[in-house]
Amino acid sequence: MNLSNLQPAAGSTHNQNKRVGRGEGSGKGGTSTRGHKGAKSRSGYSKKIGFEGGQMPLQRRVPKFGFKNINRVEYQGVNLDTLQALVDNGLVTDTVDFTVLVENRLATKNELVKVLGRGELKAKLKVTAHKFTATAKAAIEAAGGEAVTL
């Protein structure tokens, strides 16, 4: 080994970039691999998202449809079988209110909760929520519980 054949250890170097614009002798001087003229050859060029070379873009070819109701109220659904699972796991004994639902990650503190009627409820619970479906309310009361609307 001498100074003419020193090499870094295998895998220690990673830079394999083209060094463009470093003179004609490099083979990548002059236009720096950008070709001649046109927008793409110039500095500051950035193509708009969805640009199709002047062809009418997709978002303008396709007609508009639908609408979003700005007054819609979103509820986080909690089913009866989920409440029964809380009872079975010993997390709840007699009352289920909003704080219990947040602690068990069935809702976040900013959401409105609606109790839905899937599954069956065997336990006698006092359930407090923002809304109830008719089937859920009937099932809670049939089990001897109470449905309280916030």
Image: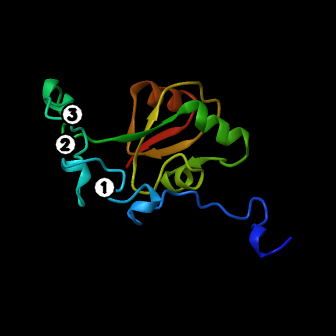
- In the rendering, at what x and y percent does residue 30 appear? 32, 58
> Cβ–Cβ below 8 Å for labels 2 and 1?
no
Please give the name of the residue rendered at 82% of the width and 74% of the height, measured from the top-left corner: 2
Mark 2 and mark 1 lie on one chain; the one further toward the N terminus is: 1
* Secondary structure beneath label 2: loop
Judged left or right of residue 76, residue 93 is right
Which scheme is used to colour this image of the protein?
rainbow
Judged left or right of residue 28, residue 7 is right
Judge whether 134 appears above or below 46 on screen. Answer: above
Nearest to the eye among marks 2 and 3: give it. Answer: 3
Q: Crowdedness of circle 3 by 10 Å Cα count: few (<14), some, many (20+)?
A: few
Q: Crowdedness of circle 2 by 10 Å Cα count: few (<14), some, many (20+)?
A: few
**Residue on which the image places disc 1:** 31
Residue 108 appears in the picture as rendered: yes
Judge whether 124 appears above or below 8 on screen. Answer: above
- In the rendering, at what x and y percent does residue 51 appear? 21, 38
Q: CA distance from mark 1 to mark 3?
A: 25 Å
Q: CA distance from mark 2 to mark 1?
A: 56 Å
Q: Which amino acid type is shown beneath numbered disc 2?
A: Asn
Q: CA distance from mark 2 to mark 3?
A: 37 Å
- In the rendering, at what x and y percent does residue 111 appear? 40, 50
**Residue on which the image places disc 3:** 52
Mark 1 and mark 3 lie on one chain; the one further toward the N terminus is: 1
Please give the name of the residue rendered at 18% of the width and 47% of the height, measured from the top-left corner: 38
The residue nearer to you, when weighing 134 against 20, is 20
The residue nearer to you, when weighing 86 against 5, is 5
Q: Tell which residue pokes out farthest to the right in this image.
A: 1
Q: Which circle marks residue 71 in the picture?
A: 2
Q: Crowdedness of circle 1 by 10 Å Cα count: few (<14), some, many (20+)?
A: some
Q: Which amino acid type is shown beneath numbered disc 3?
A: Glu
Question: Toward which corner of the image does residue 62 lie, by quadrant?
Answer: top left
Judge whether 7 appears above or below 63 on screen. Answer: below
